[in-house]
Amino acid sequence: MRPCHRLCLVPLIFALAIAAGCGKSDDKKAATQVAAKVNSDEITVHQINNVLARAPNVTPEVAERAKREILDKLIDQQLAQQQAIEKKLDRSPNVLQVLEAAKTEILARAYLEQIAAAQPKPTPEEAKKYYAEHPELFARRRVFNLEEIAVAPKEGIAAALREQVAKARSLQEIAAWLKSQGVQFAENRSVRTAEQIPLELLPRLAAMKDGEIRQIEGGGRLYVFRVVSTQLAPVDEATATARIQQFLFNQRSSEAIAKEMKQVKDKAKIQYVGEFAGSPPSAGPKPAAQAEPLKPEAKAEPTKPEAKAGPAAQAEDSNTAQPLAPNIEKGVRGLR
């Protein structure tokens, strides 16, 4: 079996392994808990509900139809598992290796989740404080129409570029100058909400006026922005509170996990052998970074909570008109 095939088997094989443990017959099991019998194995209502809980955006209105689709997929999964065992695939070295790797990953994740779950939940007062300290995300949230040039790092370029930005009337002039200097760069134009912009850049963009051009450094990168136009789209505190609390909890959990793992690693006896023998290599020079504009998917930026408001955001969160299959497929895979 080729390596790519082994990787592709990870979700299916481990899901089948979990299903095997949950699908065995038990004479003492209440009949009402059995949703289907697949040869000698059973699929329970608990399994269906477990998948349903993992499937995102399944509303109560479509829950019954979702359960039927989940059951059908679990039946297919159980049949595939039975065939795999009949063909002795569960003894294949490749399959065993994938199962062991998946088991390791699941156990490691369970440990980290236990650390996260032990963290105290942020209070409403903490959320209120965060809301007040980040008006650019909430009370004065804006939608930005931006022109952007991302400049690849080059010695001495920042100061020279700053001089060009000070006298330029358009980004086209700056792009022409960068090209004449042999500097790599990438241009982009986009419309982004405040939460779609990395937090270290947002305050500086928020301070710019429409039509203004400014050089901004952030995240080890060099940018030139022109704010074409902006539009106010504030989010009230009541709407933002739950999202802020979730963000603060995630942030707190990440810090706790990092601290715990450092302590565990410091206490562990780790020995590098073979080609990795000796001390871990020190961080050498980083490869030359490529010019890369901000990506629209930065809306999932972990440095800040999302803040959505208005009909457009509500429509984005609604899934009643969307097919269930992708969500249910994701939930079934979540069994692994």
Image: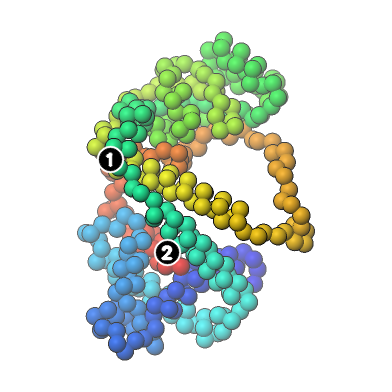
Tell me what residue is drawn at x 51 percent, y 62 percent: 108
In this picture, residue 324 sits left or right of residue 167: left
Q: Is residue 138 left or right of residue 170?
A: left
Looking at this rendering, what residue extends furthest in the left direction? 61
Q: Is residue 213 visible?
A: yes
State the residue position of label 1: 124
Which kind of residue does numbered mark 2 sit on? Gly
Nearer the observer, 19 or 177: 19
Element under disc 1:
helix
Tell me the element at label 2. loop
Instruction: Please state which of residues 12 and 220 is positioned toward the viewer in this rendering.
Output: 220
- Residue 201, image x, y percentages: 48, 28
Name the residue at 37% across, 29% down.
134
Please state the horizontal and vertical placement of residue 192, each as a whole percent of the image. Answer: 42, 32
The residue labelled by disc 2 is 334
Residue 309, quarter of picture: top left
Please rate how many residues cluster around mark 2, counting C-alpha atoms within 10 Å: few if below 14, some from 14 to 19, many from 20. some
Q: Amino acid at mark 1?
A: Pro
